[in-house]
Amino acid sequence: MFQFKYPENFLRALGKPLVVFISRVGELSEFIARALYSCVTPPFYPRLLLKQIINIGFYSLPVVALTTLFAGMVIALQTHAGFSSYGAESAIATVVLISVTRELAPAFAGLMVAGRIGAAMAAEIGTMRVTEQIDALSTLSTDPYKYLVAPRLLAGVIVLPLLVVIGDIIGIFGGYLVAVYQLDFNPANYINATVNELQLIDITTGVIKAAVFGFVIALMGCYNGYKSKGGAQGVGEATTNAVVTSSILILILNYVITGLIFTE
Amino acid sequence: MNQENNKIEVSELYKAFGRKRVLNGVNLSLKKGESLVVIGGSGTGKSVLIKCIQGLIEPDKGSIKIDGFETVGTPRKDCEKYYATMGMLFQGGALFDSLSVWENVAFGLIENQKMPKKQAKEKAIEVLRQVGLGADVADLSPSEISGGMQKRVGLARAIATKPEVIFFDEPTTGLDPIMADVINDLIISSVKKLGAAALTITHDMASARKIADKIAMLYQGKIIWQGTVEEMDKSDNPYVRQFISGSAKGPIKVEI
């Protein structure tokens, strides 16, 4: 028996999931506002920021390097397969350059770091939540947002662009390897084509994306960890949620940012 | 009643989680230097009560005054000065596992009182000695020491900043009877030494008898009885009688 006379009845018909969804959105918004506020107000913890930068940046280098290397290589191979019938083999350098710098390096670096770091952040902060370590921080007059969340967010935004610039270089190098050693291109011509085609917007697009992804990864890791409850199972859920939501958001935002920059 | 002597004054405090009412009009006061023990069964809102007092949970309505300063409804930033006078020993210790033992103890000294590291470490070792731990544990990580030692380190961390009130959340839970008694003695001696007030929540009656100046019983979100240990033993309140005798029969219904 449904009656839509009053808004209350309408909402009731939509049920609990809607209420949960709306309260989640509110909770996340409040978390983002507090987190951003703590990033710009003292006290700052430079030592913790440095630790996070090393953790996120330095130790992610191998996975980012490997994924972008093979991404560049496979793009070179596919472009050759697709374009050789049109006699446009010279396009390989351009295609590798654009796809690696604008799309592949930021997306792969983002996804790799989301799996590596987003999960670790959610697990660490979630464990601190369920073992009352976060409450203990508060009782020692230390704001957990400033001590735990702010250094991670800042590190994410600072480090991911750097990782992506390195990924750009390695990805393009991967394309070069395939073009020169497998497809027998002239090395000098390939490098020339790459340098001539290189535009600033290719790099900036990737860097902007990386900064956004870094923010999203750290945010989802911290948020899910911070709000986790219910012991080991809760921490496990938080970890899963952090990785899944940040991976999905990375792919969606990747499209949105490309759309914003490249469509007039 | 002398209001000025009260370090903490809680009146008509309410807190519900969803439809579950946890605190249902709690009235409680803690005098300076007094040791108050709140007893009550599991899930009666003891932890919620002390978390409300420390500003870790926001109550729905009511009043909490610390040194006469109303904290309910006041932004945390303005209350920080009052919260800084309180320390807490958590049930599981809640030691920071990314830091070593001495860094845990010195946390408040380094982060808030801006004490230089070297001096803070000396101070931390001194406080560790007060709780019966040697300097050799200072550089270990919290996961390398036993549960009883973790509790002692937690106590050392709580008293290192010389707070005026210390909260103890089930200080003896999960310890063997001898270690529990050691912790009780440490609580008494460290609290006396600081001249601090103590608010302990527990369901360990042996511990309550030993450390309490005053006992309050929390049942269904309300303080239903208050008095000294002697008064408790003479009390004919059926709830109190059932709780201290630990009987399954009586007015207290246990949700199974």
Image (cartoon, rainbow, N blue to C red):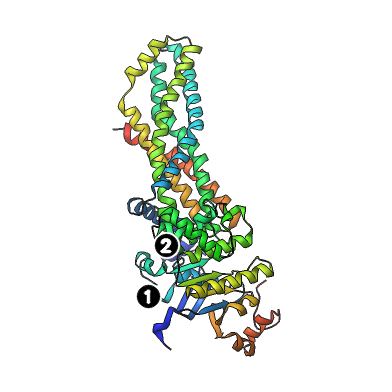
Q: Nearer the viewer, residue A130 or A252?
A: A130
Answer above or below: position of B228 versus A98. Answer: below
Q: Nearer the viewer, residue B19 or A51?
A: A51
Name the spot of residue A100 as percent of width and height, x first.
42, 26
What residue lies at 35% left-to-right and 32% top-to-bottom?
A205
Question: Which residue is under mark 2?
Answer: A141
Q: Are marks 1 and 2 in contact (CB under 8 Å)?
A: no
- Residue type at tag 2: Ser
Is the C terminus of chain A in the top left, top right, bottom left or bottom right quadrant? top left
What residue lies at 42% left-to-right and 83% top-to-bottom?
B5
- Chain hosting mark 1: B
Name the image quarter holding residue B246: bottom right
User: Helix or strand or loop: what does disc 1 sit on?
Assistant: strand
Distance, label 1 to label 2, CA atoms, is 18 Å
Name the spot of residue B164 as percent of width and height, x first.
44, 72
Name the spot of residue B233 as percent of width and height, x first.
64, 87
What residue lies at 45% left-to-right and 62% top-to-bottom?
A140
Answer above or below: position of B248 versus A89. Answer: below
Answer above or below: position of A18 versus A220. Answer: below
Answer few, some or many: residues within 10 Å of disc 1's Cα (few below 14, many 20 plus, some between 14 and 19): some
- Residue type at tag 1: Glu
Res A86 visible: yes
User: Helix or strand or loop: what does disc 2 sit on?
Assistant: loop
Q: Which residue is at the far left?
A: A264
Question: Which residue is under mark 1?
Answer: B70
